[in-house]
Image (cartoon, rainbow, N blue to C red):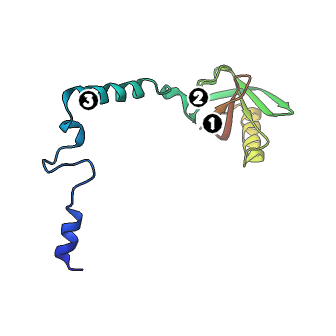
Amino acid sequence: MSIFRLSTVFRSRSAGEHATGYPALFRMPPSRALAAWLILMAALLSSPPALAGPGMTNTFQITQVGPREGGTDFSGAQVTSSMGCGNQSTIRVLPSSANYDAIVATLLTAFSLSLPVHAWATQCDADGTTIVIAAWVDR
């Protein structure tokens, strides 16, 4: 295949373009374009808030450790994350976490030395506690 033929292939129109070069939405009759725009806006506005995704907690100091059957809880004065979980004072490390021993060891060391920590929150437990899969000491 020659270079000329390759350049012709790459210059072909995309599926939504017409000979005018405008996307299909701009070639619709006004009533259909308005309906498409309203459907798009409804979909965007009905999406969950930005606080619903995984993310980092604020910097906090651990004041209490609570080992339990379903994991280990670490409490602080004000623990907030992008998850927006109901319990704003505790994080939980589940034994099923890939690095459970390392996470718990890091948090226990921070607790014993009174060092501030950060954690990576992934979900909320049934009781509103933030579940974390990583933690590190903030210096």
Q: What secondary structure is found at the residue carrying circle 2?
A: loop
Q: Kindly identify the amino acid type of the residue bearing the numbered disc 2.
A: Met
Residue 122 is tagged as 1
Query: Which residue is identified by label 3?
Result: 32
Q: Position of residue 129 (x, y in %)?
A: 70, 25
Query: Which residue is identified by label 2?
Result: 83
Q: CA distance from mark 3 to mark 1?
A: 41 Å
Q: Residues within 10 Å of mark 3 (few under 14, many from 20)?
A: few
Q: Looking at the image, which residue is at 24% across and 37% down?
A: 25
Q: Residues within 10 Å of mark 1 (few under 14, many from 20)?
A: some
Q: Are marks 3 and 2 in contact (CB under 8 Å)?
A: no
Mark 1 / mark 2, whichever is N-terminal = 2
Q: In terms of image quadrants, where is residue 61?
A: top right
In this view, the residue farthest toward the bottom is 1
Q: Position of residue 11 (x, y in %)?
A: 19, 62
Q: Are marks 1 and 2 in contact (CB under 8 Å)?
A: yes
Q: In terms of image quadrants, where is residue 9?
A: bottom left
